[in-house]
Image: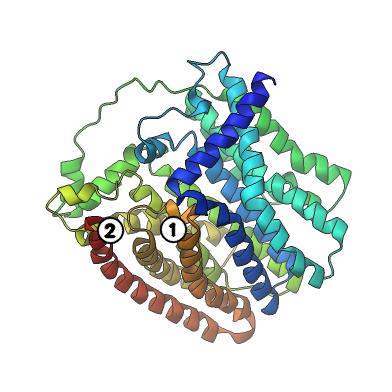
Amino acid sequence: MTLTSELFRRMLREEWRLHEHLFGGRRFAAFPVAVGLLAAGGFALLSYTGTPFSAVVAGLHGLLFFFGLQVGTIGLVGRDALRDALGDVTLLVFSARTLPVSWNRLLAVFLWKDLVYYTCFFIAPLALAAVPTALAAGIGPGRIALLWLTLIGAFALGVTLSLTLAGAATRSRLLVIAPVALVVAAVLWPGVDPVAYTPYALYRDPSIVSALRGFAPVVGFGVLAPLLFRPADTGAYRTATDRFTSLRSLLRDRDGLATRSLLEVGRSSGSVWKVLFSMGVLFAVTALLLGEITAATGLAPSPGVAFGTLLGLGSFTTYSWVTQFDGPGEYLRYPVSLDAVLAGKRRAYLLLSIPAGLVYLGVALVWYEPVALAAGAAVLPLLSVYVFGVTAFVAGLSPTELLFDTPRFVAFGAALSVVAVPLLVLALVAPVVGQAATAAAIGVAALAALAGVVLQRLAGPRWEKRLRA
């Protein structure tokens, strides 16, 4: 057995043990089953509401691209969060100093491990769940197999792109600006179709040219990422000016809990830019979906309701950032209640997530009229409040467990679906129903926000009682 294959096997085992330790022990093995069942139910519901299968396929590619971005960065950029959760450990990908192997080879093996591991645990259940809906839509077995291939390609594009950006950042932050600016210019430049340079292009228009052009960025980023990455000097110390007092005074934050959360996000890897980045990916996915639905049906869904819904629900990632350094029992040592802690977290979360979402609603003005987007400015903050309340009630200060802890994942997914499905249906029927659909969407979002406030008030006593038991 070669060193590379031995590293690959051990990294796979390490990833499994990491998730088993963090997310509920051996019941984590049921996670792919839960993903498959939830996805199958979602596909059936979308089919029942008349959503074209082509729009579902476009959304799946966008979702897996987004998931790939998250997976690629968490092992490298999110090392501080992993250290907080696991303690002082060294993962195999950071063991070049103790093993006779180069950084380049370690990162290349890490990349292949991510592709294989997440293809089995996440992509395969999603792809299998799509089969009944695909067959009902008249899609043949050959095209379904092509769908599976391009879904894996979309995930690989997200992973390799994020690792390339992380690698560039280890050399110079200016190197990150150039590719990001290039992507933004390609999206905004008239006449350029950025989707043609993604694996989804092969499914949309099967041909050798589409395959070469669509998978070329995956190969390119896959080669660049291991070559660019250089390890950070973890022994270095950083100093920062005393911003706590001035920021606390500016926010009039009497107990300082919201100020602490904001400073933690600002001083962590990626700083507050990761909030803007994650929202940007959701914005791009939503724009892609709206374009596909309009092309397939000839009807233009309400962009305000659609953007407001998906950006609001996507603010879950911001909840993860503002709680990334919190231990479940940490606050029990201090004269402060968990209710007050969650109130501070909510203030920091809203200060980060809502402005970031509004920035992208402003970007959407390039393509849509202000009147069409006005509903989004109302739906977005209301859903952000709902997401905070649900997350606080289900997961407390450990939101990452929602990703792979099967019972909590199911509860969280169901709570989001209760709001997401009616809002997305209202966005789809808005061209037919008119302003009544928009008003109904704002009403649903307002009720959800009210439920979110109630859930957040219940969450503090609930988790304090559990932690003191």
C-alpha gap between disc 1 and disc 2: 13 Å
**Image point 61% across, 38% down: which residue?**
114
**Image point 59% across, 66% down: which residue?**
38
If you read the primary sequence from the N terminus, does the residue marked by circle 1 or circle 2 appear first? 1
Secondary element type, mark 2: helix
Point out residue 51 in the picture as x, y percentages from the top left corner: 69, 73
The residue pinned by badge 2 equals 347
Disc number for residue 291:
none
Q: Is residue 135 left or right of residue 319?
A: right
Q: Nearer the viewer, residue 18 or 396?
A: 18
**Image point 55% across, 51% down: which residue?**
281
Point out residue 313 in the picture as x, y percentages from the top left corner: 47, 63
Given the image, on which type of amino acid does mark 1 rest?
Answer: Ser
Instruction: Say which quarter of the image contains residue 4.
Output: top right
Using the image, determine if residue 145 lies above or below residue 218.
below
Q: Nearer the viewer, residue 342 or 260?
A: 342
Disc number for residue 315:
1
Structural crowding at the residue carrying mark 2, measured as other residues with C-alpha within 10 Å and reported as few (<14), some (14–19) or many (≥20): some
